Every structure is written in structure tokens, then in C-alpha cells.
Amino acid sequence: MGAIPTKPATTEMLELQNLSKSYGDRPVLEGISLSIAKGEIVSILGPSGCGKSTLLNLVLGLTEASAGRIVYDGEDLTHVPMEKRGFNIVFQDYALFPNLNAYENIVYGLRNFPDRATPEELHDLIELLGLERHLNQRIEELSGGQRQRVALARTLVMKPRLLLLDEPLSALDGLIKESIKTRIRTIARQLDLTTLIVTHDPEEALTLSDKVLIINEGRIAQFGTPQEIISRPADDFIRKFILSQLTIKRDNIYRLFGNFDGMEGADAPGAVPLPVGAALTGAALRSSVSAGAF
Ligand SMILES: Nc1ncnc2c1ncn2[C@@H]1O[C@H](COP(=O)(O)OP(=O)(O)O)[C@@H](O)[C@H]1O
Ligand SMILES: [Mg+2]
């Protein structure tokens, strides 16, 4: 991931102003206010049931806000219907059409908007997501990672102004997850696409995004860069729920591989010999990712 530059914050694109949502008299989200710059990747992180998907659906326009405003590029979208917002989402279960093959899924939205992407743009996107060899396959014949890439292509071909992803990696594991993470970052950078990603995994949020919005019980616990969250956690919830998960993971890895700086060198002082497969780090991982191995 180191090869992809971090995004300097520039223009504010999406602004949430005191956004709240209740179901009946039960508040789910309260007083959500934040600004996101164009091209920024923001993760929405928090435990199950804290209101992450609700926030994404409010921005998408699938759910109506109880109070507050959603402003995009200076325009108040709070009461603008979903199809007029120009945003697009990849749902957690991908929601692909099982009766269509991969290619038919990807171009599905173009049936009503054939001018949205040129044949060259469609080709580039398919190549970027490494789907060339899978276009004629049925959805049931595809792996989890391949399905995720088809879902991403189907959404991106419509050129959304804002990309929303609900737990895009939670059904994937290991190297497949890293591969999709890299692709999401590459695409967001190449298209300068503002991207909101829901996740419940602190490692995913902190390694994937420019900024992380941590939600606890429907309120913002902290909104900041991964470095800010790690070095200055705003409260005990973040220290206990978010950071302790990461330090446990880090300590497990150190225990396995030896306590040394930089995981590249198997011969670093104090390192135990790496097991087979552990060599697939750094350059090897990046080349397998770019070769579309998943
Ligand atoms: N349509 C709905 N009607 C009533 N309650 C809902 C609805 N959608 C979500 N909720 C409730 O709102 C809370 C937050 O849900 P959600 O945003 O899906 O959480 P998360 O995505 O963080 O797991 C949960 O308690 C959930 O039961
Ligand atoms: Mg959810």
C-alpha cells in the first residue's frame, strides 16, 4: 500500500450537518456533523448496531433523515431523491443478479444510460479490476473476491460522484482482502472519487482510509486521520474497543515473528525463521495483486 500516495485534503465535498435518525422514538444516530474533502477515502468504524449502515443509507438517500442536512458540493441534498443524488453503493452482500453473467452484471446500469461510459472506459475498468477472464462466467461460478470486483465494476461504470461501500471486505479474508483494499484505494485515487466505507474492523479502517469516523452508540466518538486516532484516541471507548484490538494483533505477530523493526528481513536481529508462505510480503504481494491473482 506504500506505493499509493496519501491524499492532501483540499475542497470540502460532502458535509453532514447535525444529522440525526430515529426509528419511532428510538434514536439511532444523533448530531452527526463532519466534512469530507473531494477524493478522500473515509471509513465509518464502530461495533455492530452502532448505526454505520444507517449513516451510509442516509447519505445514499435510501433512508430519510429525521433532522439535519446533507450538503454535497454546496448543494443541499437532504430531500433530493436517491436517483438524483448521483451517488452509488456496493451493498454488503453485493446484490449481483444471479441469472446474468459477470459482464451482463457490470453493464446492467448502462442499459438506461448508454452514454455514461465509452467502450474504452468500460474496457479500462474491467482491466483495472482484473476481470477480463471472468466476463462470461455466471455469478455462482465466481469466488468471493471476484464477485466483489464485479460489484465494484457495476457501480463504478455508472461514474458515481460519491462511492459508498458497506462492509466491502467482511466476506473476504487474507490476501484477497488486501488485494481488494489496494484496488479500492487505486480506483479512488485514479478517479479522484470521494469514498465512504463502512467497516467494523479497526485494522481495515486504519489501513485503508485517509480518515476514520468512529461511531459509538449513534454519536461520533472521533473523526480523524489514522495517525491522530492512534496517537490521540479521544476516549476510553476508542482506547479499549479500537486500539486494544490492534495492539493484541501486533503483539501476536511480534510473538510469532520476533520483536524487530520492519517485517521484511527474516534475518533481522531476534527474528525467528519465517514459515513457508510468510515470504509473500511486500513486493511479492504487490505483484500477485497487480496480476489479478484473486
Ligand atoms: N428500518 C429500521 N427500522 C428500525 N430499526 C432499524 C432499522 N434499520 C436499522 N435499525 C436499527 O438501528 C440500529 C443501527 O443499525 P445499523 O445502522 O444497521 O447498524 P450497523 O450497520 O452499525 O451494524 C440497530 O439497532 C438497528 O436495529
Ligand atoms: Mg451494517
Image (tube, helix red, strand yellow):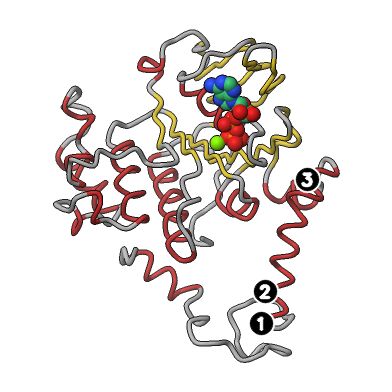
Q: Quadrant of ligand 2?
A: top right
Give the spatial CA distance, label 2 vs label 3. 22 Å
| SS of the residue under disc 3 | helix
Residue position marked by numbered label 3 in the rendering:
238
Question: Where does residue 43 sit, x and y in percent of width and height?
Answer: 58, 41
SS assignment at label 2: helix
Indicate if the residue with disc 2 has its beta carbon within 8 Å of ligand 1: no
Residue 253's disc number:
2
- Name, please, the residue furthest toward the top: 79
Q: Is residue 241 above or below residue 268?
A: above
Is 4 situated left or right of 229 in this image? Answer: left
127 to the left or right of 93: left
Query: How packed is label 1: few (under 14 Cα within 10 Å), some, or many (20 or more)?
Result: some
Amino acid on which the number 3 mark rests in the picture: Ile
The amino acid sitting under disc 1 is Phe
Q: Is the residue marked by circle 3 packed among few (<14), some (14-19), or many (20+) residues within 10 Å?
A: many
